[in-house]
Image (cartoon, rainbow, N blue to C red):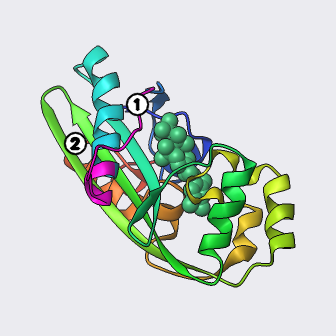
Amino acid sequence: MILASSSPRRRELLTQIGVHFRIQAADIDETPLADEGAVAYVERMALEKARKVAEEHPQEVVLGSDTSVIFSGEILGKPVNNREAEETLQRLSGQTHQVLSAVAVVKGDREKVISVATEVTFRSLSDEEIARYVATGEPADKAGSYGIQGMGAILVAGISGSYSNVVGLPLTETAALLNEFDVPVWHTEEL
Ligand SMILES: Cc1cn([C@H]2C[C@H](O)[C@@H](COP(=O)(O)OP(=O)(O)OP(=O)(O)O)O2)c(=O)[nH]c1=O
């Protein structure tokens, strides 16, 4: 199968569950449509990434995914610069937000997409701490301007739901989806 992603996190997560794959990143326009809801947006992104690669490889199973942070009805993607990363973290400080990841699997004309939501609560962060965190560079390529798997772990007071979903790929649901397309995962084959 092919992972249609440039994200090192997704590569690690998929490896973690014993899936054999190769990588072909799909570059797509990630602009939300006017009035597009958060679930519709992440599912469309995941599908477009998977479809783009599947068109070139009609016989193969292709997985695409997208992760966004949702806070007070707004879709927060990756920050465009450090200033925006700081503003995002100031907004999320002391609050609960949703991390929404969609996973799309496409093989030829057959396609399926699911999405999973995880609630993440941040403790209160000082402006100084936010500035120090942004200066590490970690927020730059991450939805919501943080990485729970990295230094960002200590910004988090707690989560409700799937952890891997926050990092970029909900593993329980991904394994079930791959199973439907007959892609082996560790518990379906000898490693
Ligand atoms: C909230 C959060 C996001 N992220 C990352 C996961 C995703 O890689 C990224 C969201 O951007 P995405 O656009 O979902 O993915 P990507 O551009 O990194 O890779 P591709 O489109 O090629 O698949 O944010 C973390 O790594 N940790 C976190 O805690």
Q: Position of residue 125 (x, y in %)?
A: 75, 79
Q: Is residue 10 visible?
A: no
* C-beta proximity under 8 Å, tags 1 and 2: no
Q: Position of residue 155 (x, y in %)?
A: 71, 75
Q: Is residue 154 magenta?
A: no
Which element is circle 1 on? loop
Query: On the rendered structure, is 69 left or right of 151?
Result: left
Q: Is residue 51 visible?
A: yes
- Residue ID at (26%, 52%): 36
Q: Is residue 38 magenta?
A: yes
- Residue ID at (27%, 58%): 37
Q: Position of residue 77 (x, y in %)?
A: 51, 51
Residue matched to label 2: 181
- What amino acid type is highlighted by mark number 1? Asp
Residue matched to label 1: 29
Residues 176 and 185: in front is 176
The part of the chain drawn in magenta is 27-41
Which element is circle 2 on? loop
- Residue ID at (63%, 84%): 94
Query: Does residue 186 lie above or below 46 as drawn?
Result: below
Earlier sequence position, callout 1 versus callout 2: 1
Residues 104 and 121: in front is 121
Extreme left residue here?
109
How far apart in space, not on screen, are marks 1 and 2 (Cα)?
A: 27 Å
Q: Looking at the image, is mark 1 or mark 2 nearer the viewer?
A: 1
- What amino acid type is highlighted by mark number 2? Phe
Q: Which mark is residue 134?
A: none
Q: Position of residue 17 (x, y in %)?
A: 48, 53
